[in-house]
Image (cartoon, grey):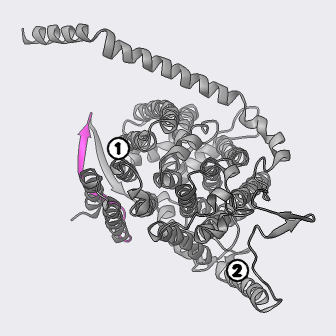
Amino acid sequence: MNLLNLLLWFSLFTVALLYWQGKQRYAGWLGVMAYAAQLSVLIALWDKMPIAASFSFTVLDNTLRWEMTGFGWFFAVITVGAALFSSWFTAGEWGAAQKDMRLQHVALAINVLAMLIMLSSGDFLSLFIGWELVSWASYLIMTHPGGKAADAAFRYLIYAMGGAMAILAGLILIYVQVGSLDYAAFWEALPNLPTEVLWALVLLLGGGFSVKMAIMPFHLWQADAYAETPGANAAFVSAIAARMGLFALTLILLKPVGMERLIDMAIPLTFLDARSLLLWLAALTAIIPTFIALQQSDARLLLAWHGIGQGGLMLLGIMIGTKMGVAGGLMHVFNYATYQAALFLAVIAVMHRTGTTDLDRLGGLIVRMPLTFVVLLMGIIGLAGLPPMNGFVSKWLMYKALLDANMPLLLVAASISTLGTILSVYKLIHNIFLGQLRKEHYKVKEVPWTMLVPMLVLAGIGFITGAMPGLVLDLVDKAQMALGYATLDHHLGGVIWPNGGINMLLVTGIFLYGIGIGAIIFFLGNRRFIVHQWDNYAGGHFLTSDVRYNYTHNFYPGVMRVIGPWFRGTIVHLEQGITNLTQILAGAFHSFYRVSYTPLYLLMVTVLALAWMV
């Protein structure tokens, strides 16, 4: 049987299965097995791409077809893997504690199906259909709990509809100019398209796809929407959902021939061209949301804002346009998915035990949830881009590519982004796990193994692919070749490069050696004894349980005075005005169509039907 057909049928079957059995306690395990089956099919596709589905449709003389290339396959592996770990997390105690998990299971499965349809699109029309399916599936997974989640999802819907209209206009322009909606016809015609047409495509398609990527200035919807997504589904959408925009933008405009045209498109009266414009938008997206994350007192919001910033870094790497830059950007998609999913699951685990993700109401949980602490620690090391976790390798590749491409200012921008990340992830781990345990959390205990194992496996993947990045670069090779870029010479431990490569096996070995020496000194050196954290004193005064001896609230006041106005600007007020106007119009049309004139509409339909019959 055609493997792409099998993959899509498996995904559709997963939706039906979880809808049928979603209320059962074992539904989470059914999801795990279904996603594992889909992942097995993807692995079987390793040496069989590109592969076309055996079915197609003709609409207005345009053929809709589906084909899996190495580029779509790379994103599909991450998508199905993220769903597997999210379902695994909910399969035990967490899912049993919820009132009704069926809608969560079904929403996750529908998102996976929609993404696979989009990632295997073989032409612009099938891409647009997949894009819309992903948008509405994302709305479902965000909004179904109601309350704050529904409000945040409604904001997303406004952005998504605006982006979809821009994309549709871009596709119409392509059809008018090229006479076809086939990818190959567009790429063949691209070098000869007039500059003004290409500028229109960059603005329409780039703007439309940037909405889902949350590239500035279309970034304000994402943090609230992803943070309010319930349970482990938040880990899924944070890990991969926004990367669908990166996939589409890269597929259409950022292949080598497209990159060459972007460089030639100078912006009058400036030193910029179209590629430079996208590079600096990516750099600003990497910086500003990262520092906005510093202002958050909710752990989920802090991570969600970082997701926006990390998306900017991915686009920055790909826009460099060299094989090292593209490899770094694509590798960062994989690396980010592993540590962001682990971080979100760790925060959800803390919420499961304490009932809150408010950083001002936590602290000292390392003594109650030590393994969750280890997961969060490994995750923030990856997010900060520090060795030996995998986030370091992809950031190193992008920094090296910026140096080799003589882009020092963008390198400084990327470094500033990393500085903001380090500051905020320290706040995250400090306010949750370090300092003094609160009295109300004294009886908190570690989460069960059904929740711990997927978190630990994700953290383990981050460490293994950090020590052996060649494993991920083998996957990246598939995507790069499908895009038309040369692959990066690498080995299991790192990258081979004429003016300086990297071997993470050596770096990790030195790191572990240092930890081993420290452990020997700690355990076999000076005598030590363990005291309760309340059996302590500071400044000559004894500390008791009623003394809060860890600093959490207003963690970086000096920095906040500088960056606070960035967030409370005109863009926020403009977005809120658009949201309010849309809600007013929606209410008006709801009344118009469903309340006031229903008998009149029925009469009109009846009269028209009789007229047609006559």
x and y, in percent, of residue 430 in the image: 72, 60
Q: Earlier in the sequence, mark 1 or mark 2?
A: 1
Of badges 1 and 2, the one in the foreground is 2
- Decide: few, some or many residues near mark 2? Use Cα within 10 Å; few <14, some 14-19, many ≥20: some
Question: Residue under circle 2?
Answer: 507
Q: Residue 114: percent from the left, percent from the top? A: 36, 48
Q: Is residue 484 above or below residue 156?
A: below
Quarter of the figure with residue 365: bottom right
User: On the image, which quarter does residue 52 sit in?
Assistant: bottom left
Q: Which amino acid type is shown beneath numbered disc 1? A: Ser
Residue 122 visible in image? no
Q: Is residue 516 above or below residue 536?
A: below
Q: In which quadrant of the rendered image does the N terminus lie?
A: bottom left
Residues packed near mark 1 inside 10 Å, few (<14), some (14 to 19) or many (20 plus): many
Residue kind at label 2, given as amino acid type: Val
Secondary structure beneath dot 2 equals helix
Residue 533, percent across and down? 75, 69
The image quarter containing residue 175 is: top left
Secondary structure found at label 1: helix
Residue at the image position 47 percent from the left and 65 percent from the top: 451
523 to the left or right of 238: right
Q: Seen from this angle, which residue lies furthest bottom?
A: 524
The residue indicated by pointer 1 is: 126
| Drawn side of residue 202 relative to residue 362, left or right | left
Q: Which residues are magenta?
A: 46-60
